[in-house]
Structures are given as C-alpha cells and as structure tokens.
Amino acid sequence: MYRFVRNTMHPARYHGRLRDQQPPYFEGWYFRIVDATEAHRFAIIPGIIWSGRPHAFVQVLDAAGGAYYHEYPVDAFWTPDDRFEVHAGPNRFNHNEMTLLIDRPEQSVAGTVRFGGLTPWPVTWVAPGIMGWYAWVPFMECYHGVVSLDHAIYGALTVNGQEIDFTGGRGYIEKDWGRAFPEAWIWFQTNLFQEPGTCITASIAIIPWLMTAFPGFIIGLWHDGQLYRFATYTGAKTERLHVTEHTIEWVVASKKYWLEMFVTQGAGSTFGLLKGPDRAEMGVRVAETLSATVHVRLTERIGSRVVYEGDGRHAGLEVHEVEARLLKMVR
C-alpha cells in the first residue's frame, strides 16, 4: 500500500513494481523536443513491455515521417524506486536531461539534451496528476501522466550523422502505463504558441469501467501561469466532437468556461507509425504526426469574455480507430 500511494503521488516514476512486472503490463515515457527554428522535431519514447515477448525499447519519431523502434533486453532496463530515472540500454532519461546512444543500421542518434524550467502538472491528494481521482483507482486499463507541460531545452543530438542544436527550443514530457492502450482515442499536444509558455494537451478515449465503458477525456490548457483543466472527473462536458479526414472540431464546457479547439493536419503532414501495447504484445500501430495545428479559444461563459485565443504550431496528433465506437459514444 505504501508503494502504491508513493508512486501515485509521483506519476513520473516507474510503476511496474506495483504489479510485480506481471503481464499484461507496459510503461512508456514520451519526450517531445523541438529546436529553436522549429525545423527539427522529434518524439523520443523509452519504455518496457512485459507482455508477450518482454523487452525494453526506445522509439524515435522524426517529424520528417520516420519512426524507428529500437529493442533492448529487459535486463538492460533499469529505474530506481525513489526518483524518475529510466535506463534503456545505453540511453538515459530523467527530469533534467536525456542522453541517447543509438547505433543501429537503420538509425544512429547520439548526444545529450538538457531540460530547464519544467512546468509540472500539479499533484495533490485529491487529484494526483492529470487523471484526477481516477489515478487512485487500481484497475484502470491505462494510466496517463504529464511530467512537464513546457520547458526549455539545451544541447545537441547527432542524428544519422547530422548534428542538430536544440538550444533555445522547447520540450514536453508525458507518460502512459497499465495493461494496454485504449481501444480508440484522439490525442494532441503543442506548446508552440505565439505566447511563450502556453501549452495544450488533450485526449479522449474509450475507458473500460467495470462491466461497461465510457468516453473519458482530459484536457489541460496552460497559459499565463494558470492551468485550465477540463476533464470527465471535473464535470466538464463535450458539447461537440466532429472528426474528418484532416480536421477535428472539439468543444468542451465547464461551469465557468467554453473551450473550443480546431485541429488541422496541415498541408504536407507526414505520419510515422509507432508501436503501442495491446494485452498480448506491442501490437498496436499508432500513426502520429508532429506537424498539426491547433486553434484554441477559451471563453468565459458569463459575459463571453475571451480569456485566450491562439494557434499552436507543430502539434503532435494521433487519431486511432475513432469511427467504430468512440464518436458514436460521444454523440
């Protein structure tokens, strides 16, 4: 019980020991880095899968469209009990930096990128992270955490022989863990707005619950030093969710605010194919782009004052199997 409480209050840490690393189980961290020119954008995803054929991994998603999956034996995965630190093969990740040393025929990545001025999602006893009180429920299929909504990055990576300087760029860190990814979901995130420090992260998914399921969502808009959260657990409601091949229109309402989000893939968006966990293996294929645009408008319901309106550039975007059930559950 002590370990469960401790880890719940520290979402960034490795949670696998709570389940004695018994399958089905996975855990992965998502580091997004964008250089100052915004021409070079990557998602680096270290993790471990204990289902099927257990192994550690580091996935590398390049905005240019390449996605690479690098496997390591489970004994090359290490993380301590008392802090957020992850080793996957020779690669190292923590709150302060990540060091990559990937040397494979299909891809080479080497270097260190450091992080400064992290913006963590608030953790309280009532709501220990982005999942709110659902974080205390021991039987969720998939848990989600946000380690940093926005931060500065420094350093360089050499990718396939090309040195890329990330100093002056921006970063974002989140994670997932549990038995499997949801059946269907929409997810997007960007912290590249005209106003430095603004970030939006949003997702909606089919959430198994006892003998049924529901469309659960969590949204965080960080702007001007304040977090505006909209979630199933806060009582917010989806007023409209319309998805086409290239766009998403999503409107949610809380007691105090309207939040309107319009997501566009963008001309020439390329998708990389990542791997995600089902209950048997890393058998889910997840298409993600790092080139979407998100228009956001936050309005007070009383008086209709626009609190914030802006466009987020180069957003990460995933839309996975939404037509079969998710959109029908929302309508």
Image (cartoon, rainbow, N blue to C red):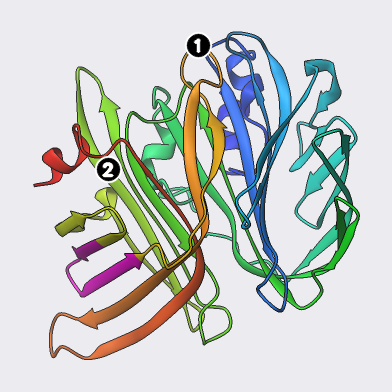
Q: Residue furthest front?
A: 268
C-beta proximity under 8 Å, tags 1 and 2:
no
Q: Which mark is residue 272?
A: none
Q: State whether residue 262 is above or below residue 147.
A: below
Considering depth in this image, is 223 or 65 the residue closer to the camera? 65
Disc 1 residue type (three-letter): Ala
CA–CA distance in space, label 1 to label 2: 24 Å
Q: Which mark is residue 216?
A: 2
> Is 236 left or right of 29, judged from the image as shown?
left
Horizontal and vertical percent for residue 246?
31, 58
Q: Which mark is residue 280?
A: 1
Residue 289 visible: yes
| Mark 2 burial class by Cα count in 10 Å: few <14, some 14-19, many 20+ | some
Disc 2 residue type (three-letter): Gly
Residue 155 visible: no
Residue found 72% across the figure and 18% down from its top? 55
Secondary structure at badge 2 equals: strand
Secondary structure at badge 1 equals: loop
Q: State whether residue 12 is above or below residue 281.
A: below
Q: Which residues are magenta?
A: 249-263
Mainly helix, strand or loop, the magenta region? strand
Horizontal and vertical percent for residue 251?
20, 65
> Is 112 left or right of 80, judged from the image as shown?
right
- The quadrant the N terminus occupies is top right
Occupied quadrant, residue 305: bottom left
